[in-house]
Amino acid sequence: MSNAISRRLLLVVHPTRSDAKTTAEALIAKLASENFEIVSTSEIEMAGIAKISLSELGDLLSESAIELAVVLGGDGTILRAAQAIRGSSVPLLGVNLGHVGFLAQIGRPTIAELATAIIAKNYKSERRMVLQYRIERAGESIAHGWALNEVTIERSSEAMVELLVQIDHRPLSRWGCDGIICATPTGSTAYAFSAGGPIVWPEVEALVLLPLAAHALFSRPMVISPESIIAVDIESEEATLSADGLRKFQLVENDRVILTSDNSPINLAQIDPALFTDRLVAKFKLPVEGWRGE
């Protein structure tokens, strides 16, 4: 890659949406005269993009050679982009092209507005908590990973999964259930919300833990300290761990999953930051007509 490039962007585009490709091409054209190099690991063919491998992306990230990751798609595309830049401080600027989400801009900027903001670095980043997990088998750590939204442990067959949950080295409950969800504040509006969990404002430092369809008297969602250590013992023949619905691992009986908050956040950028209340109203079309202000 040319050493004359003064600024470099990572562009992540939804792989099948035609409007994402059209938006990407228009943005590339706007930035063409501003001494940017735009790189991508996508297979999508577009003029003006330097295709790189994941290994090359890792090298650029380790050298702090990428200024911003621009994501054209929805929350799912942003989660994939977060996976690509994990371990760096590169902010993710999401432009939602579909339904209103919680990770991308609440409003869709024009191409000119987007390009102007990128050129002038006129965006703000907010730190989002990350969840980490470690899987132990026969007393040894065999896998580890992370999630921006949630980690789930769910049944792998028609039978319920049997789980014993501990918090801070003390037993909490044994559940026969469809599974459990451990979510970050960011993930509290995703799968955990659909399962009846509480909405947690992104600024709150906490974890959400809730069982899925548990056959038990106590099966309420819980909000837990980010300093707590959650341990889940698998007492069924098998179960499946999923991180953000993207990274999966097959669990077997007597495996233990350790869940904690992570010290390395993901930075989400916004051109026009919206209050979380406004995001809730827009997402769920909450009835606020007639509100006259304070």
Image (cartoon, rainbow, N blue to C red):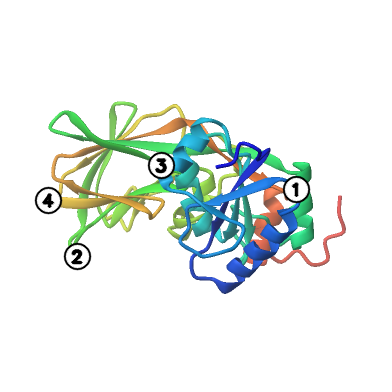
- Mark positioned earlier in the residue sequence (3 or 4): 3
Q: Is residue 255 above or below residue 99?
A: above
| Residue wearing tag 2 | 158
Q: CA distance from mark 4 to mark 1?
A: 58 Å
Instruction: Please tell me how many numbered marks the rendered image carries.
Output: 4
Residue at image coords 43%, 48%: 53
Q: Position of residue 57 (x, y in %)?
A: 47, 42
Q: CA distance from mark 3 to mark 2?
A: 39 Å
Is any atom of residue 98 visible in this view?
Answer: no
Three-letter residue code for mark 1: Glu
| Residue wearing tag 1 | 34
- Mark positioned earlier in the residue sequence (4 or 1): 1
The quarter of the displayed image where residue 71 is located: bottom right
- Mark positioned earlier in the residue sequence (3 or 1): 1
| Residue wearing tag 3 | 55
Viewer-nearest of labels 3 and 4? 3
| Residue wearing tag 4 | 237
Mark 4, secondary structure of its residue: loop
The quarter of the displayed image where residue 143 is located: top left
